[in-house]
């Protein structure tokens, strides 16, 4: 019985190591832009690797931690698998994101990419709104592009929506638009800093630890403060996004949902 219990613990790790060492070789990251490892097993191995290598900063469920942002609501710095691969492999310059272990294989990195892409996939849906009309609203009357980025275009004061249709279903999108304050992740809180001279700087909470604060103001300027060098600071845990209720008609909301849900990763 003791041997059987021990095997139950060891077997998953042993099988994972066999899989990683016997799978076919992968071209170097610079030689491919498509993820060769997208099976269910790849996703599971990617989850295991993420928790080992990335969980301390981003949380074991990738929903954000003390140092790393929430990765279940999109990726601010990449809208492609190849770009995400480079970030996981190399990190981001001038940030605390240092990248995965240097001993990790390209295959391992692709598995982590597959896991990140799988975090909140949604199914297809037949919606009443117009995608073209929603796109016009997004870039025009709705003024969404001033804060949100799609495929590298737009603002940075809100989540990147390049693949929002893979992460949020139509009902969730409708809730996001009507009641944006309902579930605001810490990454999107605002901080209001009062400096020693009484002047105030307010912006999105980019990073915070025991001794310092980093925020981005509405003009996308970055500010860093030592907590010991300011008069006070206040966290504002509501969303900076206004509700569409009263601003858009019901049909316009349908159009905007149709457009947002169309922002999906194309399946091979």
Image (cartoon, rainbow, N blue to C red):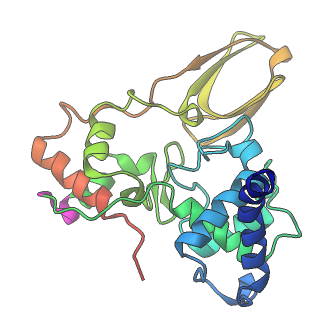
Residue 188 position within the rendered picture, expressed as x and y whole percent measured from the top left = 54, 35
Q: Please state the extent of the stretch shown in magenta in the rendering.
A: 128-133
**Which residue is at a point 66% across and 73% down the rendered structure image?**
110
Q: Quadrant of the C terminus?
A: bottom left
Q: Is residue 206 visible?
A: yes
* Residue 61 location, quadrant: top right
Q: Is residue 235 left or right of residue 141?
A: right
* Residue 120 location, quadrant: bottom left
Q: Is residue 32 left or right of residue 79?
A: right
**Which residue is at a point 43% across and 30% down the rendered structure image?**
183
Residue 203 position within the rendered picture, expressed as x and y whole percent measured from the top left = 59, 30
**Which residue is at a point 43% across and 47% down the rendered structure image?**
146
Q: In the image shown, does 140 or 83 lie closer to the viewer?
A: 83
Q: In the image shown, does 265 or 12 lie closer to the viewer?
A: 12
* Residue 45 location, quadrant: bottom right
1 relative to 68, above or below: below
Q: Is residue 140 visible?
A: no
Q: Is residue 205 left or right of residue 147?
A: right
């Amino acid at each position: 019985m003791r041997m059987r219990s021990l095997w139950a613990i060891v077997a998953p790790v042993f099988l994972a190591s066999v899989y990683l060492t016997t799978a076919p070789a992968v071209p170097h990251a610079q030689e491919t832009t498509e993820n060769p490892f997208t099976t269910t097993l790849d996703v599971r191995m990617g989850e295991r690797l993420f928790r080992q290598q990335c969980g301390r900063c981003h949380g074991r469920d990738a929903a954000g931690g003390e140092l790393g942002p929430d990765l279940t609501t999109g990726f601010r710095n990449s809208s492609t698998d190849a770009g995400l691969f480079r970030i996981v492999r190399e990190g981001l310059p001038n940030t605390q994101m240092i990248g995965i272990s240097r001993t990790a294989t390209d295959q391992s990195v692709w598995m982590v990419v597959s896991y990140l892409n799988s975090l909140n996939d949604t199914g297809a849906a037949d919606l009443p709104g117009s995608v073209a009309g929603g796109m016009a609203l997004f870039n025009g009357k709705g003024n969404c592009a001033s804060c949100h980025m799609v495929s590298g275009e737009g603002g940075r004061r809100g989540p990147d929506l390049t693949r929002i249709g893979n992460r949020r279903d139509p009902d969730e999108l409708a809730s996001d638009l009507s009641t944006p304050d309902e579930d605001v992740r810490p990454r999107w809180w605002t901080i209001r800093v009062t400096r020693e001279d009484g002047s105030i700087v307010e912006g999105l909470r980019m990073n915070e630890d025991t001794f310092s604060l980093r925020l981005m103001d509405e003009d996308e300027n970055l500010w860093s403060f030592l907590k010991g060098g300011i008069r006070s600071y206040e966290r504002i845990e509501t969303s900076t996004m206004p509700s569409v209720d009263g601003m858009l008609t019901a049909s316009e909301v349908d159009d905007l949902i149709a457009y947002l849900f169309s922002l999906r990763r194309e399946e091979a």
